[in-house]
Image: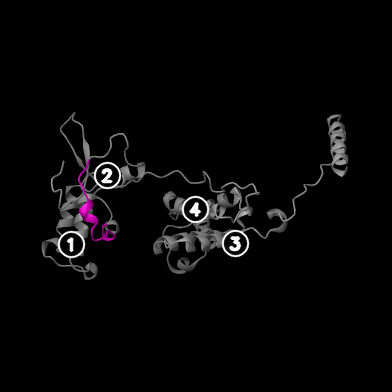
Amino acid sequence: MAVLTAHVRALKDIERRNAGEPVETPALALPPGSAVSSGKQNGSLRDAFEGWKKERERPEGTVHEYGRAVEMFIQLHGNLQLVDMRRSHARTFREELQMVPKVRRGALLKASPPELSEHGRANPSVTKVSAGTINKQLGAVQAITGWGQHNGLVPDDVLWADPFAEMRLEGEQSDREPYDADDLQAIFDAPLFTEHRLPVAAKGAAGVWLPLLTLFAGARQAEYAGLAGRGPQRWRWHLPDPHRGPSPTARRRADPAGGSHGTRRRKGGEGSEARSLRCCVSPTCGQPL
């Protein structure tokens, strides 16, 4: 009977409102134990990060990078509950990161994100961190919040949208160019190659081969240094798919030998088509295409 009475009252209120009379909107009635009313089922950003770490073993560098991004966000906004995170928080975080100086010395090495941003605002001529660096920080916090949402830190009965969706900055085009003949000559005139004088931190033969592989193939030394012992056995020469070129950043990343990152460019004569060969070395496949 109570339900029927409330229904009739609601119909009368609708009729009065349609007639132009002011009708007060009734308060939202939440079910007992809902997340919004109790708050007990919510999880914070730091809770999500700790759960993400415990889920499985992850590379130490990745954990450090994600943890740093999360702590930067917390220093700016506090340890928010995931259900309370809004796009305005993500936007403010992005704007603060855009003010962070690229080079930090002295007291800035231990400065908090708000202090770094304040320094950047006070010194507008100082070079700021790149869009790629900012996007990495945004992506790290986005990944943690997404993990929390998928793992129950945001209750299913709460409407929640990813606050970091479409918040990344447009990537910048690199202004680096390939080495020319003079650059290459200067590199190979170094004592490392002319006198076999290894740098103190070279760690033996790696000090010779890592620079050579980097120069030849265009990848970073750290990428070669991290290869497993059997990794090179799987390397091959191959032509990339002409319909799926590298990303804009990869296309612009300098290849010391004249191509884009990870490639050497075989240039034909005037009017001929230039093709790219991905540089790899393989004991079982020694011939280039």
| First in residue order: circle 3 vs circle 2 | 3
| Disc 1 secondary structure class | helix
Specify the label residue 260 is tagged with: 2
| First in residue order: circle 2 vs circle 4 | 4
| Disc 3: which residue | 79
Q: Is residue 53 visible?
A: yes
In three-dimensional space, the C-alpha distance between marks 3 and 2, rounded to whole angstroms, equals: 42 Å
In three-dimensional space, the C-alpha distance between marks 1 and 4, rounded to whole angstroms, equals: 38 Å
Q: Amino acid at mark 1?
A: Val
Foreground: disc 3 or disc 4 = 4
Q: Position of residue 279 (x, y in %)?
A: 21, 47
Q: Is residue 196 above or below residue 94?
A: below
| Disc 2 secondary structure class | loop
| Disc 1: which residue | 208
Q: Amino acid at mark 3?
A: Asn
| First in residue order: circle 1 vs circle 2 | 1
The stretch in magenta equals: 224-238
Front in this rendered view, residue 220 or 152: 152
| Disc 4: which residue | 143
In three-dimensional space, the C-alpha distance between marks 2 and 4, rounded to whole angstroms, equals: 30 Å
- Mark 1 surroundings within 10 Å by alpha-carbon count, few (fewer than 14), some (14 through 19), many (20 or more): some
| Disc 3 secondary structure class | loop
Q: Are marks 1 and 4 in contact (CB under 8 Å)?
A: no
| First in residue order: circle 3 vs circle 1 | 3
Foreground: disc 1 or disc 4 = 4
In three-dimensional space, the C-alpha distance between marks 1 and 2, rounded to whole angstroms, equals: 23 Å
Q: Amino acid at mark 2?
A: Ser
Q: Amino acid at mark 4?
A: Ala
| First in residue order: circle 1 vs circle 4 | 4
